[in-house]
Image (cartoon, rainbow, N blue to C red):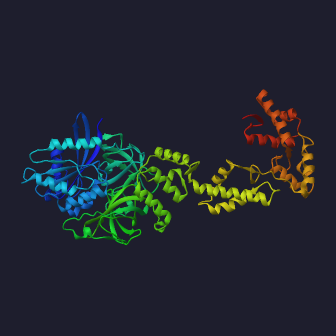
Amino acid sequence: MSRPFIVGTAGHIDHGKSSLIQALSGVNPDRLPEEKRRGMTIELGFAQLSLEDAGEAFHLGLIDVPGHSDFVKNMVAGVSALDLALFVVAADDGWMPQTEEHYQILNYLGIRRAVIALTKIDIADDPELAVEDIRENLAGGPWQGIDIIPVSSHTGEGLELLRAAVCEQLRQAPERQDLGKPRLSVDRAFTVKGAGTVVTGTLINGSIEMGQKLTVQPKGLEAQVRKIQAHGSQQEKLGPGNRCALNLNQVSVRDGKLNMRDGVGRGDIITAFKSVDEALVIDVLLQKSARAIRGIKQSVNPLKTGREVMFHHGSSGQAARLHLRGMRRLEPGGEVLAELRFSEPVSVWIGDHFVLRDASLGSTLAGGIVLDADANRRAFRKAFQERLLKARAVAPYDIGVAIRTQLERDLAVHRTNLLQKAPFSAADIDVAIQAGEHAGSFVKIGEWVFWKPWWDEKSQEAGELVCSHHEGHPDELGLPLKKLKEIMAKKLPSEKFFDLLLKGLLASDFVKAGPAIRHSDHEPKLPDALQRAGRKVQQRVESDLINPPNKKDTATNSDEEKALRFLVNSGLVIDLDSKTVISVAGFQVIREQILSYLLEHGEATASELRKETGTSRRILMPLLERLDEYGDTERVGDLRRLA
């Protein structure tokens, strides 16, 4: 089975990109009447090409992008998800202004795999000189040493060598991972009579299938996949790395006259997330090329903080306000941590590449990578956010760094929200959490993951409160849970974390003592003034194991009532109901008799069990209810059975 790849052209206007696509595939990617009339690509064009090399099949989705400076924004939309750039330079013109701009854009977008097609060699005076010119322009950059293949779309010369070079590069390309998080950046949306809404784009990060529920981001519109088409045929399921068309139910096409939230259109991101993804602020690593674009003076001007820019990501382009961290201006060749603030929401992930352009002057300014996809403008200049951004800037695709920095900043994160908008699968995130636990960096309790140094600090603080209470009140069972919660809830991001904190304490050196919590080594003692009352109460309860006196006769005054509460909370006496108490020994005697009888007879009425145990109904009925609560027995009508 052939692997799918996305290959896109780039290069200066009239250097033969569309002609090359047609020569390779037999399809003219210029589909608009205006494009055919003007002889230039305005919108994105698409074609398909199947190649075979050394017995291996390659199925290519070809994207032809416009080269004219007026349509660079459309070019950016076409190259955002490429496996390979087919970079076109005409032998008769050489390296031109839009050649340079496209080269910079591809570098900003992280496209490292490319083949250069030196076109029009049939009309060039000196193709070798053109090759040398290209080599000089690539020297010292990420594309230094890549293949340059002289070709003629008119005569066919060099096309086989070009196909072989493309196959060799794709053979080395890593396979697209299915992260279980499908994303499709919509580059076209239209209505087909009898079918309804259709969108096209390149699927990345996950698979989609017929009938699947999807969400149009960043608006949160619901949609359902009615049909999938790829490679010219209907598909039941499609994996990442494919160009495709989706026929969607439940959503209309945005026609430009409607509010942004009233339909799907170019620039939207289709995902499987059920929640709305509305980010108005993102933090990024921004880079500005040191290379000038010939004839464009502003290409070497510094980029100033506070400037309005156009943010190009996927197939979208939106206005944003740029804020630099630690400097007023970014000089050519420099990089800086920065923040982009939007008036309309965007949908981006950690690790996504983008390009910044000047809308009015029509020039490319800079590019970069997203480090925080849901930033907070009030936190941008804080030290904790600086630590996160600097760590991610060094290793933007390191899952360990991504998790560590999020937890160190946020302290507590629900598992479903941990790196949700990041290029990591759920399985990989779980493995990284386990590694962090083993290394002593994280703590996972239920579905929550905590930054361990902070969690240990809060756990220690809570434990010290309990121990301090023991020192000040040695006669009490422990610190009332209500009081501990009142103190600790103020020190936690949310009151709901108290139960998890308590769970951690009880799993270590602390135990519950009625409505209180105590250290396992703490042995409370009755005050001297209540010692005599305590002995009397205990003697009365133990005077008859199976028919002890009622609570009123067990504790006859206020001191004895205090002593009884102490004995109940310390676990020496069991409080069955508002009127009845029984010793632990008496409870166990009756319990063993009931369970033995039910094991032998299968079931019994309360009357039969009362006769068997010899206790009174006053004792038996609340005791049976307690056994039901413990899961020893169950009530079926008027009968009791073993649970």
Task: Name the foreground residue: 472 vs 633.
Answer: 472
558 sits left or right of 75 in the view:
right
Residue 179: name its quadrant.
top left
**Where 599 falls versus 267 (above or below)?**
above
Q: Residue furthest top?
A: 600
| Among the 4 quarters of the image, the one containing residue 311 | bottom left
Image location (x, y in percent) of residue 138: 22, 55
Q: Is residue 484 above or below residue 587?
A: below
Total tally of numbered discs in the picture = 0
Residue 501 x, y percent position in the rendering: 64, 54
**Front-lying residue, 171 or 344:** 171
Would residue 519 appear left or right of 147 to someone viewing this image? right
Q: Residue at x 46, y 66 (%)?
A: 380
Which residue does the image show at 72% across and 60% down from the upper left? 483
Q: Quadrant of the C terminus?
A: top right
The N terminus appears in which quarter of the rendering?
Answer: top left
Depth check: 277 or 510 in front?
510
421 sits to left or right of 229 = right
Query: Residue pushed farthest front?
Result: 140
* Residue 143 shows in the view: yes
Residue 67 image position (x, y, % from top left): 20, 58
Residue shown at the point (41%, 68%) measured from the top left = 325
Q: Can you give x and y, in whole percent of width and height, for residue 400 in the image?
A: 47, 50
Whether residue 312 appears in this view of the structure is no
